[in-house]
Amino acid sequence: MSDAPTIILGGHVLNSRFRISELKRPFPASRLTVQTVPGGRGEVVTEQTMGPRSVSFKLWAFSRDHEKLMADMADLATWLLTSGEMELSISDEGGRVRRVVLDGELDFDEYEERGCVPITLKQPDPYCNIGMPNTAQVAPGDATTVVVKHDLPDVSVSVAAAVRDSASLVWGIRFDEGDFLHIKLADDNAHSVSIDCAAPAVLVDGAVSMVTLDSNWPELARGVHTVRIDNGTGSASLTWQERCL
């Protein structure tokens, strides 16, 4: 119905019911934290972060039958106003998936045989998921090698039967012989452990827990990494979701 790329929002193919125009999708803004150095010139940048992103476009519905036109617009309003955060994919973005929420009002303009709604979607996390999640099994003993294709993937760890080390009283996993995640367990029994590094969130036997204070949330760069269980026993399933701008 339009020359615009195919847009799928919350599982709905918008092009199948609407014409799309004025698609805009700027890259995120750079946010700088600066500090003035006494006696120096200008300012020193102490931190650079990225702000959120936005995607905007206009949706057009065309019909001589105003009842059908209004039904299309009512369905659109239902999708946007009741879904909360939604997945957004655009066909020319190489499989990237954005997480977005509606930003602002739905300002519907009705004409004789058509209706138009400008849509603005906010993407709080400027990164997009790309591809399916990757999984590797990490067993006690030798290190497991994994390959990361993009910087800073979302990492999670799942263990069905984690048994703590008798000396340290923790179960743990280590990345590149550096950063590690250790979980203190209450006894020598096997426990289920789930670690979501992006949230961050930890569950032990379904109850909220946390990593030890000396643990490090892993920030994996693009390239080859080694992962091993460095405390206790119990095989782990390591999952990483590739992300990019």
Image (spheres, grey):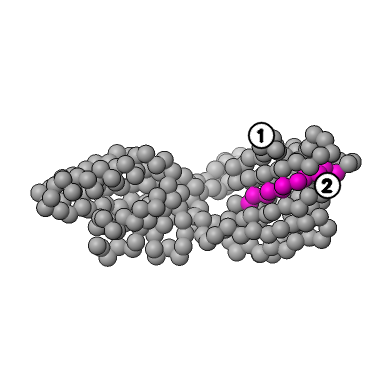
Asked if residue 194 is positioned above or below residue 130 in the image, the reply reads: above
Q: Nearer the viewer, residue 224 or 133?
A: 133
- Per the model, the C-alpha gap separating discs 2 and 1 is 20 Å
The residue that disc 2 covers is 232
Q: Percent x, y for residue 244?
A: 52, 58
Query: Which stretch is magenta?
Result: 155-165
SS under mark 1: strand
How crowded is the residue under tag 2: few (<14 C-alpha within 10 Å), some, or many (20+)?
many
Queried whether the magenta region covers residue 131, the answer comes back as no
Q: Residue at x 44, y 51 (%)?
A: 87
Q: Residue at x 24, y 48 (%)?
A: 72
Image-based side of 163 in relation to 101, left or right: right
SS under mark 2: loop
Q: Residue at x 25, y 55 (%)?
A: 18
Q: Percent x, y for residue 174?
A: 76, 52
Query: Mark 2 belongs to which amino acid?
Result: Gly
Q: Earlier in the sequence, mark 2 or mark 1?
A: 1
